[in-house]
Image (spheres, rainbow, N blue to C red):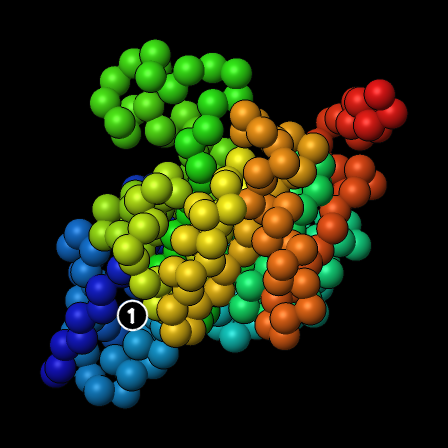
Amino acid sequence: MIEKLIYLESIDLIEFLGVKNVKFDILKAHFPKLKIIARGNWLKAMGDAEEIAAFEEKMNLLIEHYHRYNVLKESTIIELLTGISGNASVDNPEETGVILFGVNGKPIKARTANQQLMVEAYDENDLLFAVGPAGSGKTYTAIALAVRALKRKVVKRIILSRPAVEAGEKLGFLPGDMKDKIDPYLQPLYDALMDMIPAVKLKEYMENGTIQIAPLAFMRGRTLNNAFVILDEAQNTTTNQLKMFLTRMGDHAKFVVTGDVTQIDLPNPQNSGLVQAMRILKGIKGIKRITFTVKDIVRHRLVQDIVEAYDKE
């Protein structure tokens, strides 16, 4: 008799093993010749070598499925254990236009032509500028690409940043320490991440630095290797700030800069680093600009009408 230990890393045990271990019981029933014990994040199986090998193979399938889709249904467990699948196409998300599967297995796709153009441009370029109106999915698509790259181990970490520029309010009057003052500016980034990564795994990533969210000023002096880095609201950077950010790019890094040049909150809008950078860097190989329009807005139907009405003023 031999024994095998399998560590369930970054896995929500209730989702994976089931309430009152109902999913775990399905697994045990499939391997009646093994003694299988769950202790915390560890599974221990004891039995002969052939059964252990089959158990390890099926466990790898279950774990891979969970990490891809962030969900593991009882029916899926049975399909993977028996080898009888009721939906073969679900294992090929690229064929159905899915960027990745979010929380509870929600498919996250490019919803407009320009969002799809951004997904395609990612493969051919290391620096993307995604500019356009609010609600057009620039940042959401960028974060989806970043999470996919992390899951595929193309990068080792994700770094998300925004300039801390007041949009009519005074940052100094917000309550709390520096983190408390900055967090409201970064909340849209948290919201997107919570759509795509289960809470248990996201908490772990935030604690160990796999995912970092920080104001732009904290980027100075860093070299960002093996990272997917997103600068949001870049229209509110100065020329020097954006130059500083872009020159943080290290080996095997992907950078995405998003912004809306109609919502510049700088004292002098003419000093927007985003506007200048897109002009200065135009034509350089490896840099791509995607321009979103009101037709890409995917929020409430009125948002598109509101943006168009303001543009006419």
Query: On the picture, is 184 further left or further right than 298?
Result: left
Which residue is located at x 80 percent, y 22 percent?
310
Which residue is located at x 71 percent, y 55 percent?
290
Report the amino acid beneath label 1: Pro
Query: On the picture, is 12 further left or further right than 72?
Result: left
- Image vertical order of residue 145 relative to residue 33, above or below: above
- Image vertical order of residue 290 relative to residue 226, above or below: above
Query: On the picture, is 228 further left or further right than 177?
Result: right
Which sits in the foreground, 185 or 313?
313
Q: Residue furthest bottom?
A: 50
Q: Position of residue 160 (x, y in %)?
A: 42, 47
Which sits in the foreground, 67 or 37?
67
Which residue is located at x 64 percent, y 46 percent?
275
Q: Position of residue 293 (x, y in %)?
A: 79, 43
Element class at badge 1: loop
Which sits in the foreground, 162 or 9?
162
Query: On the picture, is 252 further left or further right than 259?
Result: left
According to the image, label 1 marks what residue?
32
Which residue is located at x 35 percent, y 29 percent?
182
Which sits in the foreground, 246 or 23?
246
Residue 23 visible somewhere in the drawing = no
Q: Quadrant of residue 157?
A: bottom left
Q: Which of the image's four quarters has the C terminus? A: top right
- Image vertical order of residue 260 relative to residue 144, above or below: above
Q: Position of residue 221 (x, y in %)?
A: 28, 55
- Dot 1 surroundings within 10 Å: few (below 14), some, or many (20 or more)? few
Residue 247 visible somewhere in the drawing = yes
